[in-house]
Image: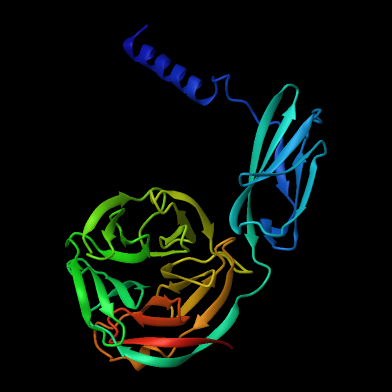
Amino acid sequence: MSASNLLHSIILSILFISCGGNSEVKKKQFSIKIHNTAAKIKLGESLKASIQNKKNIKIDSIQYQLGDTTIQVSTGTSFEKVLKEERLGNRFLKATVFFEGTQEVLTKKVTLLNDKAPKLYHYTIIAEYPHDQEAYTQGLEFSNDTLIESTGRRGKSSLRKVALTTGEVLMKKDIDKSFFAEGITVIDGKIIQLTWQAKEGFIYDLHTLEKTASFGYNQSKEGWGLCNDGTKIYKSDGTEKIWILDPETLAELSYIEVTTNTGIKSKFNELEWIDGKIYANTWQKDGIAIINPKNGALEGVINLSGLREKVKQHENLDVLNGIAYKKDTKQIFVTGKNWNKLFEIKVVEK
């Protein structure tokens, strides 16, 4: 055999093994079918599915799971469940079919939607306070009567303590020029600060602003906003996901997906925890989303249009960003990137 023929035979053998000669590759015996239109189901509606068994193989049982929760075990091929308190967004219905001493796992993507449209809210201005026009606000939160603020942009990022009524910067820590600082939250005597695309965050002593540690991100794409409920930290990364973090290790434990009655939403920026809900700036929007942290339902939208026109107009003026809640007095404050004012607002239903 010539060298060229030998090479040809070797190539054919490799192709046979990789494309068709692997006896371990088994064809699926079953498939799963979702009967809801476009595989979209609202809370209160029934998720309907069935196992397609074209060869009429005897099935011993089928176990159905939505996410990690087992929701039904049956011997029949039809499945139906009314959705009540499930986590919303993109989910997977998983069916494990047991037959002939073996099993086959099937999955199908479904989208779970809220059953109500978001409530619409407006605002009234209660008071106005000075705010540093050079502050590219990325995070804002109260520690007692003092505002903790994170400002962004490479070469200009900082962490600050700010007096509410005067806007005076009481303490400031400049961030390394290689980082673009993002959202913050205050928990257990610490300030947690994100950076944008570096996949690294920082931990500071609340009293001195001295950096004590850093941490890496896991699955989240970027660092945008942070808030906490006292026991868990919530993190936005620009996608539809809001991640739930362990407050000690800052590991990403799980996530919710922000969802309305029509679809899944994204680009949530600065976050604040207010009376059991997540309030979130939406990037490039003059509004705040009110999000249920249990299932991701976008329950309300506060229209803050017109507020930007009330600050000094200049070439570096940027979008609304920054929500701070003074829990003891139930006051809400908002500002924006390079705004010269901080506003106390009252939220009113439209």
x and y, in percent, of residue 117 in the image: 64, 75
| Image point (51%, 81%), residue name | 302
Tell me the colour scheme of the image. rainbow
x and y, in percent, of residue 207 in the image: 26, 66
Camera-nearest residue between 299 and 167:
167
Q: Is residue 113 left or right of residue 284?
A: right
x and y, in percent, of residue 225 in the image: 39, 65
Camera-nearest residue between 331 and 338:
331
Question: In the rendered view of the protein, which quadrant contains the C terminus?
Answer: bottom right
Q: Is residue 58 left or right of residue 135?
A: right
> Where 219 falls versus 227 (above or below)?
above
Camera-nearest residue between 305 and 110:
305
x and y, in percent, of residue 152 in the image: 26, 69
| Image point (57%, 65%), residue name | 259
The answer to which quarter of the image holds residue 301 is bottom right
Q: Residue furthest top?
A: 1
Camera-nearest residue between 167 and 83:
167
| Image point (44%, 71%), residue name | 272
